[in-house]
Amino acid sequence: MANDTALIPVERIDRAILVLRGQKVILDTELAALYEVETKMLNRAVKRNSERFPADFMFQLTKEEYDVLRCHSGTSNVKPSPAQRSQSGTSESRGGRRYLPYAFTEQGVAMLSSVLHSERAVRVNIEIMRAFVRLRRMLQANAELSLQLDALEKRYDHQFKIVFDAIRELMEKPKAKERRIGFRQTEGSKK
């Protein structure tokens, strides 16, 4: 068998893991792309085996969750679901989703290997499980570091507060920089 790490770049899997409803999940579209199948084929296999996917393994996003994800990812050219079209009164006919996406938890992704019977699905699932484990270890290490920092902060007086605040700031998730879109007019270019 080929080297598992060469199948899919680790970063691609890591980027596919989102946190929704307090759980780490991967959307059906991302999983389908990783497995190299169509999203509708993946979802059909899941629906044929629905008893294997309880609510803590898989859930469908709400319209609000989907809208927030679309805003953050910048994908605005996605066809709304029939329910969304009826609410907005549009009858768009270009391609895209016709229903809200499904999110698979770590257990749901593990269960997918039992309903998708390709060698690639098994190998991809192994890599995804490793990515979930890496993420869990990073979060645990961060929590342990935070506890150690709290203990140090209690032992030393407040003159080190600036140092501790700076360390906490470095531990926080980086905030996305807001990019301005459009043209900038310079002084010399006015007509």
Image (spheres, helix red, strand yellow):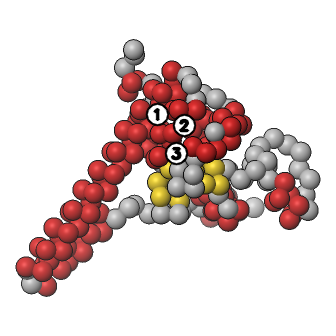
Closer to us: 43 or 33 = 43
Task: Single out the residue that lies furthest toward the front.
Answer: 51
Residue 189 appears left or right of 144: right
- Residue 122: x percent and y percent? 48, 27
**100 to 95, vertically: above or below:** below
> What amino acid type is highlighted by mark number 1?
Asn
Quarter of the image for residue 143 reads: bottom left
Closer to us: 100 or 11 = 100
Residue located beneath label 3 in the image: 108
Circle 3 or circle 1, nearest the eye: 3
Q: Measuring 53% from the left and 63% from the top, which residue is drawn there?
A: 21
Circle 1 or circle 2, nearest the eye: 2
The reply to whether residue 96 is in sight is yes
Residue located beneath label 1 in the image: 125
Mark 3 lies on a secondary structure that is helix
- Residue 172: x percent and y percent? 34, 65
Q: Measuring 64% from the left and 29% from the top, which residue is drawn there?
A: 37
Dot 3 surroundings within 10 Å: few (below 14), some, or many (20 or more)?
A: many
**115 to 119, vertically: above or below:** below
Q: Do the residues labelled 3 and 1 touch (CB within 8 Å)?
A: no
> What amino acid type is highlighted by mark number 2?
Leu
- Residue 24: x percent and y percent? 46, 54
Q: CA–CA distance between discs 3 and 2? A: 6 Å
Residue located beneath label 2 in the image: 112
> What amino acid type is highlighted by mark number 3?
Gly
Q: Are marks 1 and 2 in contact (CB under 8 Å)?
A: yes
